[in-house]
Amino acid sequence: MPSDRTDRESVGQGPINARRYFWPAVGLAAVALSLWLLYGELRGVSLDDVGEGLAAIPAHRWLLSSLCALAAYAALAGYDHIALMHVGKRVSRLFVTLCSFTTYALSHNIGGSVFSGAVIRYRAYGTRGLTGHDVGILVAVCWITFVLSTLLVSGIVLLLEPHLLDRFSGMGYAPLSAGAGLAMLAIVAAYALGGWLRLRPLKIRGLELHYPRLPIVARQLLVGPIELLAAAGIIFFALPDAGNPGYLVVLGVFLVSFSIAQISHAPGGLGVFEVVFLVGLSDMDPVGVVAALLAFRLLYLIVPLALALVVVLLFERSQFGRPPSERSRN
């Protein structure tokens, strides 16, 4: 018969285990629901139609989309470089670039990018002398960079395309969109002002996060938007010309789709991203939209994932058999 202590520990672990499985369950539920909705959206589209849509993308557009994917991952590497500048740690540029590429290539496909990215970064940067606290701050700065960039670009898009949200509801949200855009830009401006005034550090669960200096804030607001603009460019260049609403609208639909996919916790945003994007571009031929989304998944998710797995294997091989003192050497 188990002891009282064992019973208490088992009871105490219940909520922890529940929290552990809650978000994966939410993600899987989002995938299932989205795939069902996606089936309804594409009921009249065959695999042959999608294959023809992919074949219809010209070679030069494949090249432009590929260059956008490279630019997006180069900008993502900038996230880590900026965060390390804020932490005050020096790590070789090549290592940081490879670590960032691997982190985002894996976390984009796994889902829960903040948590999965933290684990990957801790494993990699721990070999370069960074502590768990350092990695926690680095992850927080990268996440803040992404949120700020999304707010900045979304705010500008909503001001320039106030009817964007009508594509998802058709209820005439133009005045609300303009107000939301201004509010987003105000949040970004307040963040920059906080860096200029050097406000008190923000404490999150024992993690003390200092406001970045203005030069770092400027880098955040430059590098982050480049990643979003390039990622949206992958889809824009893969879309057919017929019915194409233009880059700014595609960018706005991408931001809405990507944000909802992130919130859903669905691995890789599978199904969620596609459903929202098809709704946002409902005035276009769905075959061409699906082909462009498949090109995006290939260039932004699948190919980087394959390359990241190679990087991980090579890294672990280099670490195998080395004494702990050498593994943590800068």
Image (cartoon, rainbow, N blue to C red):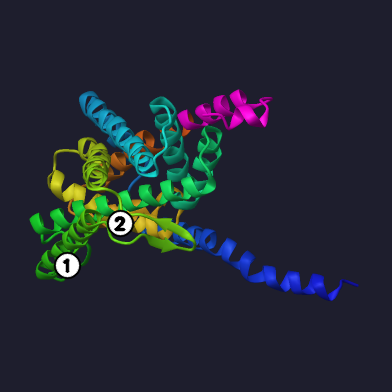
Q: Position of residue 166 (x, y in %)?
A: 16, 64
Spatial CA span between label 1 and label 2: 14 Å
Left or right placement of residue 62 versus residue 97 in this view: left
Q: Position of residue 121 (x, y in %)?
A: 49, 41
Tell me: residue 109, above or below residue 312.
Answer: below
Identify the residue position indicated by label 1 in the image.
170
Disc 1 crowd rating (10 Å Cα; few below 14, some 14-19, many 20+) is few
Q: Nearer the viewer, residue 154 or 50?
A: 154
Residue 93, quarter of the rendered image: top left
Judge whether residue 38 can be spotted in this image.
Answer: no
Q: Which mark is residue 92?
A: none
Identify the residue position indicated by label 2 in the image.
276
Q: Position of residue 252 (x, y in %)?
A: 20, 52
The residue depicted at 26 percent of the width and 56 percent of the height is 198
Residue 7, quarter of the rendered image: bottom right
The number of callouts visible is: 2
Q: Nearer the viewer, residue 78 or 324?
A: 324
Q: Position of residue 3 (x, y in %)?
A: 86, 73
